[in-house]
Amino acid sequence: MLHSRLVPGLLLAASLTALPSCGTDPTPPPRWYFTCGDPVCSGYRPPPGVPACSSQTPGAACAPEGDTCDPVDGCNRLLMCATSDPTQGTGGCPISRARFKRDVLYLGEGELERLHAELRRFRLATYRYRALPAGRERLGFIIEDVEPSAAVDGERDSVDLYGYASMAVAAVQVQARQIESLQAEVSALRRRLDAREPRSKR
């Protein structure tokens, strides 16, 4: 008699223990999130193999997890179906604080001059994308003309805009030093001419 009374109670307790308590599910349902996009926004470029978004909106529920679509964003962000914001995790969007980086080596004058010379060899061209035959004419360089280069993301057949912009900064720094050197030479020549002028008047 005692056994028949205890068993149902034990079974009920076991079943309650096995069920997850309300609100404690560690995995939230997937939703649409923006991905990082380009470090430097430079206009829309169609991503190969990614379908265009239709009714997908950031924050809305989605399935299956891992799906992506193209919202035609000026910074080339995609929408991704995920259980957490992909821009906030480890290895998320490009960030420039020193605490997030390692193996930091500052470029010397010779390396800056090398990047300056490399950038001067870039051949600029106008073009249109085959996938957008009626699309606007664009300006840029062709990857095959310059690779390997810090301005190229070869794995994705795209331009590394952060690297490209950094190369441009290197070129500006080299040219600024050249201008300063020329200005110093001009100033020295003026001083020499000014020093000779009184003698010529005599």
Image: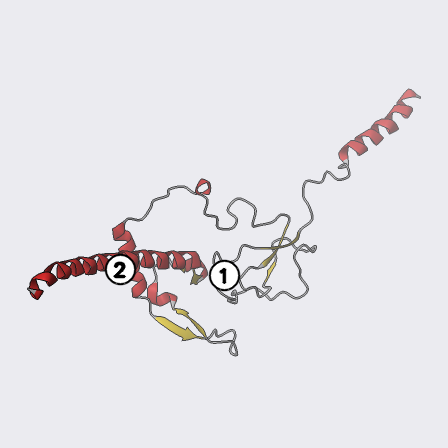
In the picture as drawn, the residue positioned furthest to the left comes out as: 202
Residue type, label 1 = Cys
Relative horizontal placement of residue 88, taking residue 2 as reference (left or right): left
Decide if residue 19 is on the left or right side of residue 62.
Answer: right
In the rendering, at what x and y percent does residue 195 appear?
A: 12, 58
Q: Position of residue 143 (x, y in %)?
A: 38, 65
Residue picked out by circle 2: 179
Relative side of 165 to 173, left or right:
right
Report, in whole angstroms, how far the alpha carbon at label 2 lies from the one at label 1: 30 Å
Q: How many marks?
A: 2
Q: Spot the residue most to the top.
A: 2
Instruction: Name the residue that disc number 1 marks.
Output: 41
Q: Amino acid at mark 2?
A: Ile
> Residue at coordinates 24% horizontally, 59% vertically from top-left?
183
Describe residue 7's horizontal placement relative to residue 148 as left or right. right
Where does the image place residue 32, in percent across and percent down from the top left? 64, 55
